[in-house]
Amino acid sequence: MDKSRTQIKREMEALQALGEELIYLPLETLIGMGLPSDLLEALRFARGVSKRGARKRQLQFIGRLMRAVDPAPIRRLLNERHRGSSLDAQVFKTAEAWRDLLVSGSDAPLLEVRARFPQADHHHLDRLVQNARKAGATGGSAKAGRPLFRFLIALLSPPAAAADAPGQTAEDAPD
């Protein structure tokens, strides 16, 4: 069965939108995707186009070039990137909240972190919490909470991203 003109137009607009998302990816990622050289050049050129009409024409051109490319692997890569960035934001917010609770003075959050992550270096965690609390009580800078925050990020990060986490990083190691 032949596609209607409306269906063809929807597909072309989807390819154009996909091409527009590709403009914002790092060049190394685009090269690694194995895209045709003319499409890579069109994407590179589109980054520098700021005039509305010229940008629209360039996006249409990218959409036309995208017809020769299988969009499924590109969509899969973009979905993984979006999922990863939202996961990173979630980890960041959780670590931030825990850091604030740990520095507040209550030991309940500390016990919760210990219970959720029994493999963590508890002695190091205690020392980081103590240093952050001490700096907060004496009116010290926010820098004291950074090592604690990095430690919490390492605990919360997925195992694939942090193979040796949780534990000390080179910056957190005692002198």
Image (cartoon, rainbow, N blue to C red):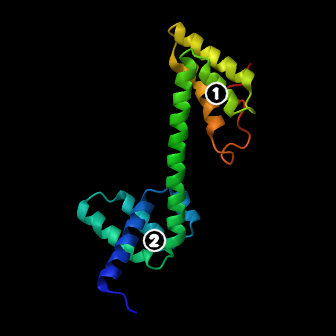
Task: Find numbered disc 1 in the image and state the secondary structure of the residue it sits on.
Answer: helix
Q: Residue at x 30, y 85 (%)?
A: 5
Toward the top, the furthest residue is 138
Q: Nearer the viewer, residue 166 or 51?
A: 166
Q: Quadrant of the C terminus?
A: top right
Density class for disc 1 (Cα within 10 Å; few <14, some 14-19, many ≥20) is: few
Q: Is residue 11 left or right of residue 87?
A: left
Compared to 43, does 160 lie above or below?
Answer: above
Q: Which residue is mark 1?
A: 112
Does residue 110 sit above or below 4 in this rendering? above
For the N terminus, the quadrant is bottom left
Identity, as a three-letter code, of the amino acid under mark 2: Leu
Q: CA distance from mark 1 to mark 2?
A: 51 Å
Crowd tier of the residue under label 2, counting other residues whose Cα lies within 10 Å: few below 14, some 14–19, many 20 or above: many
In front of the other: 1 or 132? 1
Q: Nearer the viewer, residue 144 or 114?
A: 114
- Residue 122, quarter of the rendered image: top right
Can you see residue 62?
no
Please report the residue visible at 52 percent of the width from the left and 30 percent of the height from the top.
Answer: 96
Residue 168, numbered label: none
* SS at circle 2: helix
Q: From the image, state whether disc 1 or disc 2 is nearer to you.
A: 1
Q: Label 2, on which residue?
A: 39
Q: Is residue 175 left or right of residue 133?
A: right
Q: Position of residue 147 (x, y in %)?
A: 62, 25
Q: Quadrant of residue 50?
A: bottom left
